[in-house]
Image (cartoon, rainbow, N blue to C red):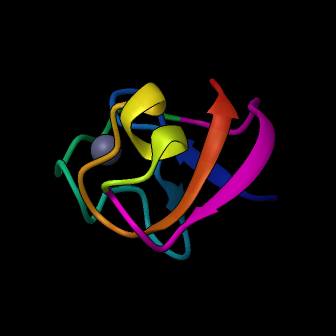
Amino acid sequence: MKKACKSCKRILVKGNVCPVCHSTDITTSFQGVVVIFDVESEIAKRLGITAPGKYAVRV
Ligand SMILES: [Zn+2]
């Protein structure tokens, strides 16, 4: 089962620590996945994403 960070919505590939914000507040219940390549894009700004990668739309 995939996990996502509750603070920044990052999808975790492994482990229980977020690689972006180092939070251990992880959830397995999240909705939707977006892949952010450009942190200057509208979707990244709307979701508050500051590092490229895979993110949950809603946690
Ligand atoms: Zn995080």
Q: Is residue 17 left or right of residue 42?
A: left
Q: Position of residue 33 (x, y in %)?
A: 75, 51
Residue 14 position (above or below residue 29) = below
**Residue pictured at 46% horizontal, 27% vertical:** 46
Residue extending farthest to the left is 22
**Residue pictured at 24% horizontal, 51% vertical:** 50
Q: Position of residue 56 (x, y in %)?
A: 64, 42
Q: Is residue 20 left or right of residue 18?
A: left
Residue 47 position (above or below residue 36) = above
Q: Position of residue 14 (x, y in %)?
A: 51, 75
Total numbered labels: 0
Residue 30 position (above or below residue 16) = above
Q: Which residues are magenta?
A: 27-39
Q: Position of residue 12 (x, y in %)?
A: 52, 63
Say which of 16 and 9 sits in front.
Answer: 9
Q: Quadrant of residue 34?
A: bottom right
**Residue pictured at 54% horizontal, 41% vertical:** 43
Q: Which quadrant would the C terminus be assigned to in this image?
A: top right
Residue 11 position (above or below residue 6) = below
Q: Is residue 15 left or right of residue 40?
A: right
Q: Quadrant of residue 38?
A: bottom left
Q: Which quadrant would the N terminus be assigned to in this image?
A: bottom right
Q: Quadrant of residue 49?
A: top left
**Residue pictured at 27% horizontal, 65% vertical:** 19
Ligand 1 quarter of the rendering = top left
- Judge whether residue 9 is colored magenta: no
- Judge whether residue 34 is colored magenta: yes
Q: Is residue 9 left or right of residue 21?
A: right
Say which of 56 and 12 sits in front.
Answer: 56
